[in-house]
Amino acid sequence: RWNNGPSVARTEHIKSTIIPPAVFDIYKKPLVIHQGHMQWLYDHEGRRYLDLLGGIATISVGHSHPKVAAALQEQIGKLWHTTNIYRHPKIYEYAEKLIAKFPKNLEVVYFVNSGTEANDLAVVLSRLYTGNEDVVSLQGSYHGCSSGLMGLTSTQSFRQPNMSVAGYYHAMVPDPYRGIWSGCRDSLSQVPGACSCPGDCVTSDKYAHQLSELITHSVPSGRLAAMFAEPIQGVNGIMQYPKGYLRKARDIVKKNGGLFVADEVQTGFGRTGDTFWGFESEGIVPDIVTMARGIGNGFPLAAVVTTREIADAHSPAQYFNTFGGNALASTVGKAVLEVIEEENIQENSKTVGKYFLEQMMQLQKQYPIIGDVRGKGLMIGLEMVKPGTKEPLDNVAEIFETVRDLGVLMGWGGRWNHNLRMTPPMCINKEDVDFATSVLDEAFKRHSP
Ligand code: PMP
């Protein structure tokens, strides 16, 4: 009953002949998934995997969550789509529910289909509002890979020759582990030798100064349209900044005429546990928030939330998006928010995430190939190094394959793809964490030098 689609050989053939090589694929041995339920995925032979990647922070409440699936099924039988030309009540009900999750002045929402589109629109809004063009993001950031956003994204592997985009600058990423200043961060784990500042980390001032210098020396007009930042970088291997950095960065950007944009594509919807949005842990209110992935639990939906004043910089009737928040998308988005509330998903992220981080810190004591353990809530990263050094471990791909053979799926990331990343469906429990820990233990045992 599991062989209800193309076989491994058939998918491999299609992949090598029709799908372009640039399209991302992570396993050496192809994995063909046929079904999913909550935190579990099943391959073509019915083999079960604990999914700790969650479509990279996309599956928020669980694969094929029954309540979300039922809402979608009901809506499918009634109406799929109208484009905003006719009023459909679902989009308004959903908009109201989503906006209630934000601080008061963030009161308008644009619905779009992907994180790339959301960030692209945020660039447009910030340029329209400020009258400035230049945009800053952080080294190691990922914000999308359209022709424009290749400038905003700084992750080296997603940039292409002959595709440089004018007007984008990358500030030094405040990396407490590898950066020129090691600092403390808002997490259970501390970088060995780091300071343990009671309030802001002292290094936050140093990195903020670097940002200020970049704006002064590199941005021709010294005036910014915006700075974009992920509250915790995902693609860059779960990079947490020193405490206080984002708040200081925001102040500098405002002083230079720009807007502060929080990219919550991975960190939003309770994933970081303590707060619903990543930016809240720094006590700041951004001017624009972009979100995707977890918002739709796998359904193509994304959004841009901002102030009325910023949205008013857009000329009336000058924004069009065919599918953004259509009847199906809004139905799913609303059901996802309901499940997050009804099933205490944010609280689960916090408690299970803390337990997960503690287990990883225990493993770190046994395996010197784990250079750093970090993260918050259910967004956890392990930086894999050659023992006694900070050089990237070169057999991370083998560890990754072994973990999969033992029944767990996770991601990799970081500058050299040398980090293991966990962003699971937020319904996982402590038993799942125990299983994952035993699998990682076995994989590290097999692959330690
Ligand atoms: N922002 C962040 C932080 C992301 O991780 C991603 C996807 N990796 C995007 C934006 C782009 O989202 P999408 O793939 O939906 O365009």
Image (spheres, helix red, strand yellow):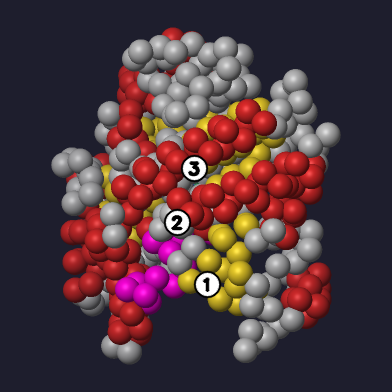
Q: Does the magenta stretch include residue 67?
A: yes
Which type of secondary structure does the marked residue at label 3 adopt? Answer: helix
Name the one closer to the observer, 293 or 128.
293
Mark 2: secondary structure: loop
Q: Mark 3 points at which residue?
A: 356
Q: How crowded is mark 2: few (under 14 residues within 10 Å), some or many (20 or more)?
A: many
Q: In this rendering, does residue 159 appear at all? A: no
Q: Give the range drawn in magenta.
A: 55-69
Q: Is disc 1 placed on a helix, strand or loop?
A: strand
Q: Residue at x 59, y 22 (%)?
A: 177
Q: Nearer the viewer, residue 331 or 321?
A: 331
Q: Which amino acid does label 1 sit on?
A: Gly
In the displayed structure, would residue 133 be above or below residue 88? Answer: above
Report the amino acid beneath label 2. Ile
CA–CA distance in space, label 3 to label 1? 22 Å
Q: Nearer the viewer, mark 2 or mark 1?
A: 2
Q: In which quarter of the image is the N terminus?
A: bottom right
The answer to whether one can see residue 187 in this image is: yes
- The residue that mark 1 highlights is 36
Identify the residue at image location x=79%, y=37%.
448
Q: Name the residue under label 2.
A: 428
